[in-house]
Amino acid sequence: MRILISLTYYRPHYSGLTIYTERLARALVSKGHEVTVLTSRFSPELPTEEYRDGVRVVRSSVAFRLSKGVIMPSMPLKGWKLIQETDILNVHVPQMDAAYLAVMARLSGKKVLMTYHCDLLLPRGIIHWMANWGSTIANEITARASHLIVTNTQDYALHSPFLKRHIKKVHPVLPPIEMPSVQDGEVARFREKYQIRDDEKIIGISARMATEKGVEYLVQAMPIILKRFPNARVLYNGQYENVLGEEEYAQRLMPQIRSLGDRWTFLGIIPPVEQAAFFSVCDVTVLPSINSTESYGMVQVESMVCGTPVVASDLPGVRHAVQTSGMGIVVPPRDARSLAEAIIKILETPSNYCGNIFEIKSRYASETIASQYETLFNKLFE
């Protein structure tokens, strides 16, 4: 089957949406499908076309940016040509270009499947307001042009004002999770590299430094945690500098983080094997997201696969992994004290938050998720 996947940012850009799409594309290729990804050439150093892990990647040049979105004059023409060569268009939103791509596909007699990752909630400001408004209209057009809609959970769909309007088209499919196995020696090297002592209690967070991630609530929770565990330390895994559209948020938060001294360490973006070592050395990880821009939080499943429990916000979709695995605690969003108390509880009694890791790996495996997409693709041709 010839599958065209479109999204605003693809690898080497780093975000949950791009990681999800990359894993899905690779898994579909491994099942014998011909997959093309149509995306932005967000950096001039990137080639306009290349193959990555068997996936053909076609990029459109960016004329200018609007908030976190990009304007690509060549996208419609490239999209039209690629749509004529495909059987199914799978649009991943939020994506401004998804609307006209979905309409062009329908006019060409092609099948359209929309993957809805999250409601877009941007910070205040006229540019962000324009981006939100444009995204809302684009989503509505895309949904009406799509035959089916995929989202992570029914829980999220039932609480999303947008998805509720199209609930008859919605099919929940969990996100694909991949985590390389890690050897004891690699974990030891990770500990040595970041000077992690055996007596420290490691609290992990894996996220971009972005408003919706609620990082400030972990910062506010740390003084409470340190009273109970003076040796507690946060390891921050992910991009924390120059995050598109989030520079002001990071600038506001940095003085509070610096006040924690050596109890907070930024790792930056680390390679896959170090990711597995990171989750393995953590005693608990946190996902303190604050709004519906976070629809699941794949990192919490990556943590569970490595045997590490999670404290996650009690948000639609986000709470699903903890509730179905038993490997953690859900807490009210924007509540630093509840977050601190949950972290302390897990650090005190970690054996109470074990789960069936083999079952979790199987349920979220990229091959499993790609098979579920295949079922939906076949449904479109019935």
Image: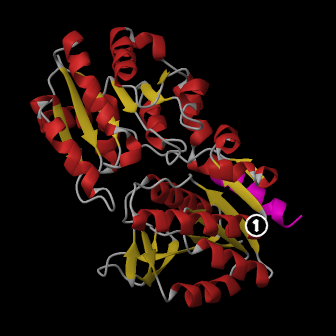
Instruction: Tell me if 90 is positioned left or right of 354 in this view.
Output: right
Residue 180, image x and y in percent? Answer: 41, 43
Instruction: Decide whether residue 380 is among the magenta residues.
Output: yes
Instruction: Decide whether residue 270 is among the magenta residues.
Output: no
Residue drawn at (64%, 87%), measured in percent from left and top? 80
Q: How is the image coloured?
A: secondary structure
Residue 105, image x and y in percent? Answer: 72, 79
Image quadrant containing the C terminus: bottom right
> Disc 1 on helix, strand or loop?
helix
Callout 1 amino acid: Arg
Residue 217, image x and y in percent? Answer: 33, 31
What kind of secondary structure does the magenta stretch mostly adopt? helix
Residue drawn at (43%, 26%), measured in percent from left and top? 310
Q: Which residues are magenta?
A: 370-382
Residue 74, image x and y in percent? Answer: 50, 89
Residue drawn at (49%, 56%), measured in percent from left and top? 17
Give the labeled residue for mark 1: 144
Does the image show residue 238?
Answer: yes
